[in-house]
Image (cartoon, helix red, strand yellow):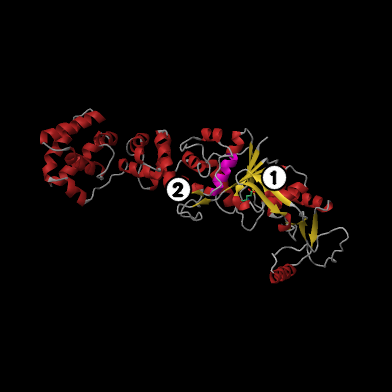
Amino acid sequence: MIRTRFAPSPTGFLHIGGARTALFSWAFARHHGGQFILRIEDTDIARSTPEAVQAILDGMAWLELNHDEGPFYQTKRLYRYKEVIEQMLANDQAYLCYCSPEELDEMREAQRVRGDKPRYDGRWRPEPGKTLPVPPSGVQPVVRFKNPTEGTVAWKDMVKGVIEFANAELDDLIIARGDGTPTYNFCVVVDDLDMQISHVIRGDDHVNNTPRQINILKALGATVPQYAHLSMILGDDGTKLSKRHGAVSVMQYSDEGYLPEAVINYLARLGWSHGDAEIFNREQFVQWFDLDHITSSAGQFNTEKLRWLNQHYIKAADDTRLAGLTRPFLVRSGANPDDGPELSLVCALVKERAATIEELADAATLFYRTLHPSAELLALHVTAEVLPALSELVERFKALSWGRSAISTALKETLAAHGLKMPKLAMPVRVLVTGEPQTPAIDATLELIGQDKVVTRLEAGLKAAQA
Ligand code: GLU
């Protein structure tokens, strides 16, 4: 049975790197018909916040990365960590260490002077025939794991290949602090064991934790899961991800008008590939996803590519859905989407060129706001030369059975009657009716704005120009 987990620490929002880890863990479970577990690693009380937990849940929900079990909170499992620590102490797999912070500092200083690597020297580690120091009074001991001292610990990482550490390099890890609280690496181990995780897919910033976790798992008699450590993601400019690119919350992408399916498609290609496929939906991704085609080199964030994918998905999206997403952007910008043409029809007209919903809303605004054209635009386009043609056009529009092709015909006939070229007439019409020199196709735009509004605005413009 394949069981994967996503185990974020709620110390910030769900950012692009975390979302990619979540996506790969989710997809691996889905591909194999397994289970995907969500675990909140909130034992760092000082840095964990309920807002961050909510932000993670929101991000996962927006991306539709649904979990089968959880969310499990580590702070609710403290009794269990305690139980395992007791068991390890009883089995001589862990021991109490009374070293004070000052003593540890001295130890490290002496090692530094000798040119040795700083490490715990095992002075409280029980060994057959060894006499331990007398426990000092008033010191709360920490609990240390009795790491093997010889041999190596190795695993075949599903992304990075064989990774091996010498046990001599690994300290006897503190698994419980003086106040009894369990430490990070230990909680991960107990959870991965209890939750029967078969594949740990996580960022490669955890590679150094893995040998310690494997040793503890082995001490507990557990089957060691498979590990896949994903390479980090670099920013657009090849440096570490920063807030300028990608290190923002995935919810910010929602706020900026990206579609979740675009973000999913984008994240899927960040360090994984299927031939040269660039555009594929979630189902396709789940069908294709495996750990064999994850690149071991760092992925690089590319905002332009994300925009390109988003544009693709906007074009493909249902117009009613787009209208629902566009509405709040319009309202925020002060436009009234209820005073004007049906929003889904406007979305259908303007979506061709929008890379985000925000841009879609910008393009839609002219249908919902009475824009007052600037004096410069009027002077440039509504010239004396074109006024007779504009007057005729208004008369034709009044009598028209309103529709795109009838509008187009009326424009062409007016042009012919006055010996003008299309832009000469289309520009003043655009400016007077929408306040903008650029609009989608003039006939389609006028059709959507509606006969009454078009006629009223043209007449008002003519009157002003003639005055
Ligand atoms: N809580 C860790 C983090 O947010 C992940 C631990 C793990 O995946 O093993 O980086």
Identify the residue at image location x=80%, y=67%: 138
Q: Whole-percent x and y of residue 398?
A: 19, 32
Tally of numbered tags: 2
Is tag 1's residue or tag 2's residue first in the polypeptide sequence? 1
Does residue 149 lie above or below 116 as drawn? above
Q: Residue furthest right?
A: 129
Label 2's element?
loop
Q: Is residue 403 visible?
A: no
Q: Whole-percent x and y of residue 94?
A: 79, 55
Choose between 274 and 56: the one closer to the eye: 274
Query: Hey, what amino acid is under mark 2?
Result: Asn
Q: Is residue 374 left or right of residue 84?
A: left
Identify the residue at image location x=44%, y=43%: 258
Magenta run includes residue 174: no
Q: Quadrant of residue 320?
A: top left
Q: Is mark 1 within 8 Å of ligand 1?
A: yes
Q: Which residues are magenta?
A: 17-26
- The disc placed on residue 302 is 2
Residue that numbered label 1 is attached to: 192
Identify the residue at image location x=75%, y=43%: 222
Q: Whole-percent x and y of residue 237?
A: 45, 54
Q: Is residue 23 visible?
A: yes
Query: Hey, what amino acid is under mark 1?
Result: Asp
Quadrant in which the N terminus appears: top right
Q: Does the magenta stretch mainly form a helix, a strand or a loop?
A: helix
Magenta run includes residue 24: yes
- The reply to whether callout 1 and callout 2 are in contact (CB within 8 Å) is no
Q: Is residue 165 left or right of residue 246?
A: right
Q: Is residue 155 left or right of residue 426?
A: right
Q: Of discs 1 and 2, which sits in the foreground?
A: 2
Label 1's element?
helix
Marks 1 and 2 sit apart, C-alpha to C-alpha, by: 34 Å
